[in-house]
Amino acid sequence: MDLPVSPVLSYHLKLSVRMENEKNHIIPYRTFLYVLALLITLTLTSVALTQIYLGTLTVVLALVIAAIKSSFVLRIFMHLKFENRMFSIAVIAVTLLICVVIIITFLDYLYRY
């Protein structure tokens, strides 16, 4: 019997076959614990940084620490380091765009008066 298959079902069948060929990336728990310890350390550093008066440098350092923390979360916890290079390029492009917007905002704030 040759029964017709709906386009939606055939797409899901092809997708399941394609997903069987993909590799699973298993990261050891030790790596997750190292990254967790690093994130906690960077958070404590960021909190301690707010207690020191450095002027506008305080905000810049806090943003740099936040960018480092987000890069670890993206690469390790969200498995971006195992994804296609196009995803990495897209994330870097968006991050650079956000940095440009923040820099323009800082310049506007600093040279307003």
Image (tube, rainbow, N blue to C red):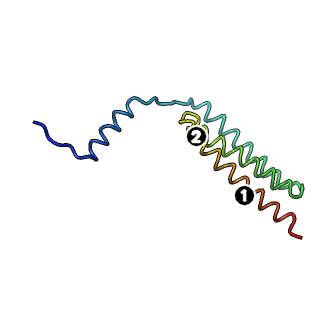
Q: Nearer the viewer, residue 11 or 63?
A: 11
How far from the left and from the top, in percent, is residue 92?
A: 65, 44
Residue found 23% across the figure and 46% down from its top = 6
Quadrant of the image occupied by residue 73 = top right
Q: In x, y percent, where is residue 2? A: 13, 37
The circle drawn on residue 4 is: none
- Residue 21 position, x and y percent, is 40, 29
**Residue 88 position within the rendered picture, expressed as x and y whole percent measured from the top left:** 60, 40
Q: Who's the residue at 55% across and 33% down the image?
A: 82
Q: Tell me if 62 is positioned left or right of 111 in this view.
A: left
Residue carrying label 1: 101
State the residue at coordinates (61%, 41%). 89
Front one among 11 and 29: 11
User: Label 2 amino acid?
Assistant: Phe
Give the amino acid at mark 1: Val
| Residue 6 left/right relative to 78 | left
Taking the image as shown, residue 16 lies to the left or right of residue 102, namely left
Circle 2 packing at 10 Å, graded few (<14), some (14-19), many (20+), is some
Q: Quadrant of residue 35?
A: top right
Judged from the image, the secondary structure of the residue bearing numbered disc 2 is: helix
Residue occupied by mark 2:
77
State which quarter of the image contains the N terminus. Answer: top left
Closer to the eye: label 1 or 2 = 1
CA–CA distance in space, label 1 to label 2: 26 Å
Quadrant for the C terminus, please. bottom right
